[in-house]
Image (cartoon, helix red, strand yellow):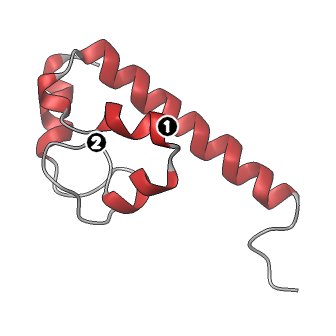
C-alpha cells in the first residue's frame, strides 16, 4: 500500500469488510475490530500516522484471520440452523 492508499482508507466512511460506518482514521469499523484479537486491533487504529508497510501488514493479517477463523467455524457446522 502507498501513503495515498492509506490516507484514502482512513478517510473512507464505510468499512471495507462489512460496509458499516466506521470512525475516520481507522481501517475497519468498531464491530470488525472487536472480532479481532487484542494484539491486532491497535495496528488498525490511527492509520494516517503510521508507516504504509505497517498498515498493509496489519490489514493482510486481519484478512487472513477473518478467512481462517470463520472458515474453521463453518467447517465445524457453526452458523447453520439445524
Viewer-proximal residue among 37 and 58: 37
Which residue occupies the extreme front position in the image? Answer: 38
* Left or right for 75, reference 10: right
* Left or right for 45, reference 64: left
Give yes or no for contact between labels 1 and 2 (Cβ–Cβ under 8 Å): yes
- The picture places residue 25, in percent across and down from the top left corner, at 15, 42
User: As displayed, is residue 73 above or below residue 46?
Assistant: below
- The picture places residue 64, in percent across and down from the top left corner, at 59, 34
Q: Residue at x 13, y 50 (%)?
A: 24
* Left or right for 10, reference 61: left
**Residue 67 lies in quadrant:** top right
Q: Earlier in the sequence, mark 1 or mark 2?
A: 2
Q: Residue at x 86, y 67 (%)?
A: 77
Tell me the crowding category of disc 2: few under 14, some 14 to 19, or many 20 or more residues within 10 angstroms, Cα based.
Answer: many
**Residue 18 lies in quadrant:** bottom left
- The picture places residue 32, in percent across and down from the top left corner, at 42, 56
User: As displayed, is residue 60 above or below residue 1?
Assistant: below
| Callout 2: SS | loop
The residue to which callout 1 is attached is 62
Disc marking residue 13: none
Split into 4 quadrants, where in the image is the N terminus? top left
User: As displayed, is residue 6 above or below residue 16?
Assistant: above
Q: CA distance from mark 1 to mark 2?
A: 10 Å
The residue to which callout 2 is attached is 27
- The picture places residue 6, in percent across and down from the top left corner, at 20, 28
Viewer-proximal residue among 29 and 41: 41
Split into 4 quadrants, where in the image is the C terminus? bottom right
| Callout 1: SS | helix
Amino acid at each position: 500500500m502507498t501513503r495515498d492508499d492509506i490516507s484514502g482508507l482512513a478517510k473512507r466512511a464505510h468499512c471495507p469488510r462489512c460496509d458499516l460506518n466506521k470512525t475516520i482514521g481507522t481501517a475497519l469499523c468498531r464491530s470488525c475490530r472487536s472480532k479481532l484479537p487484542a494484539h491486532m486491533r491497535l495496528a488498525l487504529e490511527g492509520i494516517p500516522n503510521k508507516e504504509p508497510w505497517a498498515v498493509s501488514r496489519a490489514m493482510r493479517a486481519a484478512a487472513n484471520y477473518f478467512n481462517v477463523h470463520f472458515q474453521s467455524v463453518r467447517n465445524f457446522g457453526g452458523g447453520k440452523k439445524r
